[in-house]
Image (cartoon, grey):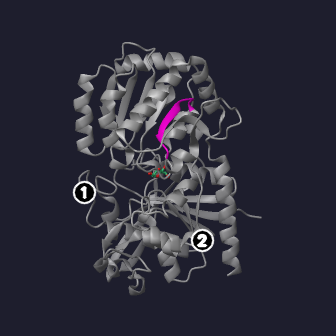
Amino acid sequence: MAKRRLLFAASEVFPFAKTGGLADVAMGLPKALQAHFEVTIVLPLYASVDRAHWHIQEGESLHLRMNGLERSFTWHSTIYEGIEVLFVHEAALCDRPHLYGEPSHDYEDNAVRFGLFDHAIVARLEQGGFDVVVCSDWQTGLVPLLLQERASSIPSLFMVHNLAYQGNFPLSQAHDVGIGAGYLNADGIEFWGRMSYLKAGILTATHVVTVSQRYAQEILTPHFGAGLEGFLAHHAHKIEGIQNGIDTVEYPRQSDKKSAKIEWMARLGCKNPQLPLVVFIARFAHQKGLDMLIEALPRMLQTPCAIAILGEGDMRYAQALEALAPQFPTLFVQVGFNEKLSRALYSVADFLLMPSLFEPCGLNQLIAMHHGALPIVHGVGGLIDSVQEVTHFDATLPKGVGVVFDTPTADALVAAHERAMTLYNDRVFYERLSMHNLSLDFSWKQSAKRYQKLLDRLIKEAHRG
Ligand code: GLC
């Protein structure tokens, strides 16, 4: 039988455009599903996408009328690692310096911009040939809604990567983007007097997946539900969690981790390469536990260790970290995202810090464990699903090992860090734990099987009608 055709839609896809983990998943998962499906990926052709470098070819144009205005799109495409990648170009959506907004604020016309993206995706689906569509986060939330409005027989799977980003816009814009008035109530997509694209996706998709199992449960509670817990509970029957994987091919291991670490410690300017190297790599956002980290750092640095921090985002955090760095000879802060440095740090780190307040999945802990590091994590979401603290070595443990703390406070983080440093000093135990993490498979293999089964089921049920 010919393979089923899957369209994978996302607002960012590595290596073309990336602001966070979504981009990695939007390439890693389709790649892993390729053995079973004929996969096409679709994303906007942002100004920052290097057309020449990726051999992106221009194709047909498409004209859509939205709210009386004619909008012109052009399709573009390339083949990347055997996968067809479609890009849609429309001036308002694409010709901007950033994907979603300036560092200080989102673009004001994001409802229209991503509404246009979703209309283009649906137009493509209506041309025929696809058996199922997978969408991610609010930027593609209107895809399932428009399919439902048009009574399409194509089933949709909506992935929730982060409930905190909801795509909430004035209700007055609903008409502009082709949303019927019937959706504009609390049982529909209305949310605190606005409309939510995230709600649209969850409400109208055939099925919903969160990126870890624990997160699927957490979001039903007021603490993690971001105000949507009641709505989510109502739809819980079609929500499940599937843990993300990582594209392990993207993260080759060091053949000699010890000497690579010595080299990188020197490059950081660290005089003592024997110190344990603790790394923090993240967007500088409240979610990532920056407040806790900044408060805890001076105490953490009282124990002999080197701490390297890499990331960008909220200026407040960047400034606070840059102010701390000169006070501590073994604290290294680099503001600005640097893919090469981040990969190097993952590959040589002894520990990876992830004090996130909430974490739908988290990929960094998986990358770190794939390189044999031990994560120090706040026990939430995908972090608790992938990391366990152990006092006795047990080689049969299916999870990775590291240090886990339960309350998101600077005190708890300092205590966890101290436990980690004690572990490091027990060289035999540390090596065993590190070997355990190296022996585990963090690739997409297992999770892709679950997606495959789920998507096959959705296609089958759609045919049954
Ligand atoms: C978002 C989440 C993160 C998850 C990633 C990929 O960035 O915050 O936890 O790993 O999406 O699904």
Q: Residue at x 33, y 48 (%)?
A: 286
User: Where residue 105 is drawn, which disc sits there?
Assistant: 1
Q: Nearer the viewer, residue 272 or 52?
A: 272
Question: In whole angstroms, how far apart are the C-alphas of marks 1 and 2?
Answer: 36 Å
Residue type at tag 1: His
Q: Nearer the viewer, mark 1 or mark 2?
A: 2
Kindly state the secondary structure of the residue where label 1 is placed: loop
Q: Nearer the viewer, residue 365 or 21?
A: 365
Q: Residue at x 24, y 24 (%)?
A: 326
For residue 39, what is the image quadrant?
Answer: bottom right
Residue at which label 2 appears: 237
Query: Could you tell me residue 42's position as x and y percent?
Result: 49, 60
Instruction: Please report the bounds of the magenta region as a residue range.
Output: 371-379
**Mark 1 residue's CB less than 8 Å from ligand 1:** no
Residue 280 part of the magenta-drawn span:
no
Mark 2 and mark 1 in contact (Cβ < 8 Å)?
A: no
Kindly state the secondary structure of the residue where label 2 is placed: helix
Query: Could you tell me residue 284's position as x and y percent?
Result: 33, 43
Q: Nearer the viewer, residue 63 or 356?
A: 356
Q: How many marks?
A: 2
